[in-house]
Image (cartoon, rainbow, N blue to C red):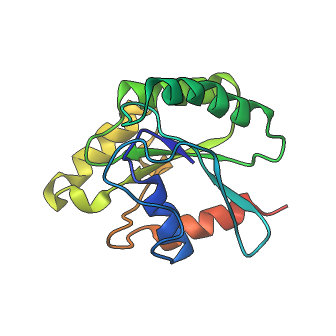
Amino acid sequence: MVGRSNVGKSSLINALANRKQLARVSNTPGRTQLINVFATPSGATFVDLPGYGYAKASKATRATWPRMIEGYLLEREELDRVLVLVDGAIGPTPLDQQMLGWLRHHDIPHSVIATKADKVKSSKRPRRRRDLAEGCDLDPGDVLWVSSTTGAGIDQLRSMIDLWLQP
């Protein structure tokens, strides 16, 4: 799972696991500073990588993240799919677009998950869905929208993950 700092990676892991404190959630960007691995009941693992973009961490710590993240994504043979989390209320940032381009360049299977769906007003959702998908160079139906707060889309994401993890 990748995404910019404060996009909701830890909150989404908690929602998927149906646990409140499995992954540490913070309002401060950059709290995830290591590769955090979570085991699933099926024996698969779910990995939370440090966020990209602004982080309230030392310059020396932030400097280690790109190589750590790239090394993990390029060298992990068991990697089935990368979930790229994009803030649904903000849309894809240049850093999100850079990450998507990097994954495509390296032929790494990935899916875009729009987080914070509850923060988008219902009257603006159709336009936001189109704009976000276009910014990610995808069709609107290729982006799954979720909310860790309301639970919207969480069951659908769980089902998709189960499909991706089938042998």
Q: Quadrant of residue 139?
A: top left
Look at 72% across and 36% down and name the residue there: 72
Look at 70% across and 25% down and name the residue there: 106
Camera-nearest residue between 32 and 119: 32
Look at 72% across and 60% down and name the residue there: 45
**Residue 46 as seen in the image, left or right of residue 31:** right
Look at 50% across and 77% down and name the residue there: 19
Instruction: Decide: is 72 above or below 154.
Output: above
Instruction: Decide: is 127 above or below 74.
Output: below
Q: Position of residue 87 (x, y in %)?
A: 34, 46
Camera-nearest residue between 99 and 62: 62
**Residue 76 as seen in the image, left or right of residue 155:** right
Q: Position of residue 97 (x, y in %)?
A: 45, 27
Instruction: Decide: is 66 above or below 152.
Output: above
Q: Quadrant of residue 102?
A: top right
Q: Position of residue 59 (x, y in %)?
A: 45, 24
**Residue 2 as seen in the image, left or right of residue 39:** left
Number of marks in the rendered image: 0
Instruction: Decide: is 125 above or below 29.
Output: below
Q: Quadrant of residue 157?
A: bottom right
Q: Quadrant of the C terminus?
A: bottom right
